[in-house]
Amino acid sequence: MSAKSWPKALEIVVHCCLWALIVCFPLFLWGRDHQISTINLLCFITMPVAAAIVFYINYCAWVKTFLLRKKLGIFFGLNLLLIALILLGEHLWHEWLIEIQRAMDGTPHRHGGPSPWLFALRNSVMLILTCGLSVAIRMTVNWYQSEMQRQTLEKEHTEMALKNLKSQLHPHFLFNTLNNIYALVAIDQEKAQTALLDLSKLLRYVLKESERNTVPLSDEILFLQQYIHLMSLRTGPNVTLTVDFPDPKTLAASQDPQIAPLLFINLIENAFKHGIPASAKAFINIFMKWDAQDGVLEFTCSNPMFDAAPLSSGDTGIGIPNLRQRLEYLYPQRHVFELKQEGSVFMVYLAIRINAEKTLPEKQTD
């Protein structure tokens, strides 16, 4: 049974059980030795039938047609007319059954007994309550259906937004990498050829794994290490590169956490793009730490900011805005993303709680 069909099936089961209870409950009040005649059953069944008529006319038609469209006058007027007609029908039905019973028993016509107005008052209250119950259940069902539709649309919107962000990521990654290889051609053609082979491996990962919602952290680390190796081919002896990642083999052999792919590549791209000068000494420090106990993955990257224009003008291309949006979609209230510049040093901090049990506090900065 599909997710959409089971609420409807549950609704039918609840209705059947409810009306079975309403119809059968008074029968248990009769003793075992009490004889239930056909006339008794016909008299008794009128109230459940009347309640069902009021309930389902409102449930199936009038609540949706009039009440939800704010036609309150028509809704209340129709219900008052319906209840009045039902009360009149009940009265005539009971009078007819009483006449049949007296004819069968041979008893003369009597005017004693409870007043018909008392029965009418009791039954009208019951029918009004039935109408209110119908409205309450119908409104609850409508709210549930609207909520399911809203969640479905929200999920589809999120999936479309993520797909759009990923489609932006592919050319962005390719253009930046090709620019680096182009710069490498002027320095060392042999290295440039090796870089093109490495690029083909990286693109295979980007095109394949980006279609998945999550990938093992060990695979993502191997991809980042390959990319860093590719970019380091164009660095000279004046650049000190420090990289510290969790061991992919150790992660793969243990509980390898699942993470959204390609979250860190833009940050490393920017470090190589803006942190490598032509001749001055520089450094690039890239660290990643995985806390299996707390389920928190931390990433830091720092480098000198020789090209400060992007930060000062707020123009960071599509990489950083893309990453911010993906983090908001994928890890809402479960990530901390900070960009900070102190003097000529640019620092990036990203922490993600992989499991959804807790939120992350804001990182304390000096």
Image (cartoon, helix red, strand yellow):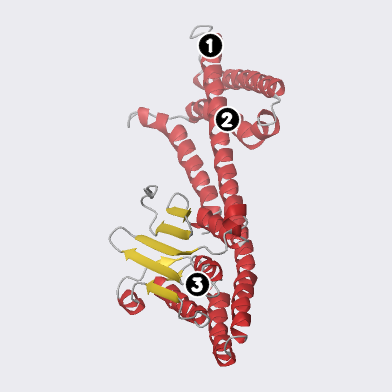
30 and 110: which is toward the camera = 30
Label 1 to label 3, Cα distance in Å?
A: 121 Å
Q: Who's the residue at 51% across and 83% down the image?
A: 233
In the rendered structure, which disc, 1 or 2, sits on the residue that comes first in sequence?
1
Left or right: residue 216 compared with residue 111? left
How many residues crowd mark 3 within 10 Å: few (<14), some (14–19), many (20+)?
few
Label 2 to label 3, Cα distance in Å?
A: 77 Å
- Relative image position of residue 260 (x, y in whole percent): 48, 65
For badge 2, the amino acid type reads Val
For badge 1, the amino acid type reads Pro
Residue under label 1, please give it. 108
Q: Where 62 falls versus 212 (above or below)?
A: above
Q: Where 17 falls versus 69 (above or below)?
A: below
Comparing labels 1 and 3, the label whose residue is closer to the camera = 3
Left or right: residue 256 compared with residue 304? left
For badge 3, the amino acid type reads Ala
Comparing labels 2 and 3, the label whose residue is closer to the camera = 3
Count of residue discs: 3
- Relative image position of residue 38 (x, y in whole percent): 50, 31
Residue under label 3, please give it. 280
Q: Who's the residue at 55% across and 77% down the image?
A: 208
Kindly tell me whether residue 30 is visible in this rendering: no
CB within 8 Å, label 1 to label 3: no
Label 1 to label 2, Cα distance in Å?
A: 45 Å
Extreme-left residue of the structure: 293
Residue 68: which quarter of the image? top right
Residue under label 2, please give it. 135
How many residues crowd mark 2 within 10 Å: few (<14), some (14–19), many (20+)?
many
Q: Who's the residue at 59% across and 50% down the image?
A: 154
